[in-house]
Image (cartoon, helix red, strand yellow):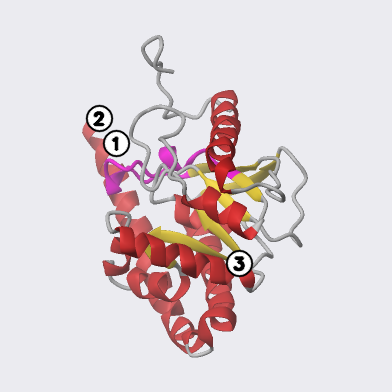
Amino acid sequence: MKYLAKLIKVIYSLYGFTCFFLLMLLLMPVVVVASFFGRVKGGNVIYNICRLWADTWLFLIGIHHKNIFEAPHDRSVQYIFVSNHISYMDSPVMMKAIRRQNFRVLGKAELGSIPVFGFIFKQAAVSVDRKNPENRAKSLLVLKSIIKRGISVFIFPEGTFNQTHRPLKDFYNGAFKIAIETQTPIKPVLILDAYDRLNYKSIFSLSPGRSRAVFLEETKTAGLSSNDVPFLKEKIYKQMESCLVNYKASWIEPQPEGDF
């Protein structure tokens, strides 16, 4: 039975990723056309296409998504969304979570090398190579220009997958510096079930089931200065950490006393 269960999981995963790429191939011509309309108008169209892709793919593989609002969420307000990062499934879940709002995501530059997906990523996302200080600085400037155009941004402040089995990894400063410099409120969004739907350890860990995104209370940055970056980062970290613990996020494991 153990080997049969593994075989079924592999078959399901192959089915899931076949659907993933076929849907992208079907939508690719529309993305190509949209890319000629510029980073703003064309980018907004591409994000709506990505939402359609996420809706269809998650339906086909049996993942049902729900947004949970721990605090009121005003879709007319421009935000810097920050979220935990635990799985490749975070991307489609992000598209299910942020609805009827134009936004851009900051993503790892290496994602641009993935066949098919990479082309769409380059058209829609702001890429960053966190190992390159010059590239990081350029990415921050691009994000600021996007915010000036009235578009929200979505950032994973952990930078990469959290493999610590703590609620969160340490945060980078970038999201909080941008929030203060542009006086844009921060809205934390927690992704709870992506770790169970697709574990970072194996692409053959894909599984159907629930998906939840939790919207937390926003933090306004009006009046804050660059000296407040550590304070703001710690406040958001503790807010997100506490909620992940309350929701019993499945990747959290007991830590030695004094470490957690």
Give, as a three-letter code, the residue at label 2: Lys
Position of 236 compared to 109: left or right?
right
* Magenta span: 189-208
How many numbered badges does the structure rendering display? 3
Q: Quadrant of the N terminus?
A: top left
Question: Mark 2 or mark 3: which comes first in sequence?
Answer: 2
Q: Nearer the viewer, residue 97 or 62?
A: 97
Q: Does 206 lie within the magenta span?
A: yes
Residue visible at 26% across and 38% down? 6
Q: Which residue is mark 3?
A: 147
Q: Is residue 185 above or below residue 28?
A: above
Evaluate whether residue 19 shows in this view: no
Q: Secondary structure at mark 2?
A: helix
Within the magenta stretch, is there residue 236?
no
* Residue that label 1 marks: 5
Residue 23 in sight here:
yes
> Residue 95 lies in what quarter of the image?
bottom right
Q: CA distance from mark 3 to mark 1?
A: 47 Å
- The alpha-carbon separation of the residues under discs 1 and 2 comes to 5 Å
Callout 1, which amino acid?
Answer: Ala
**Residue 231 image point, x, y percent:** 58, 35
Answer with left or right where residue 68 lies relative to residue 170: right
x, y (%) of residue 241?
Answer: 54, 30
Element assignment for label 3: helix
The quarter of the image holding the C terminus is: top left
Residue shown at 50% from the left, 42% from the top:
209
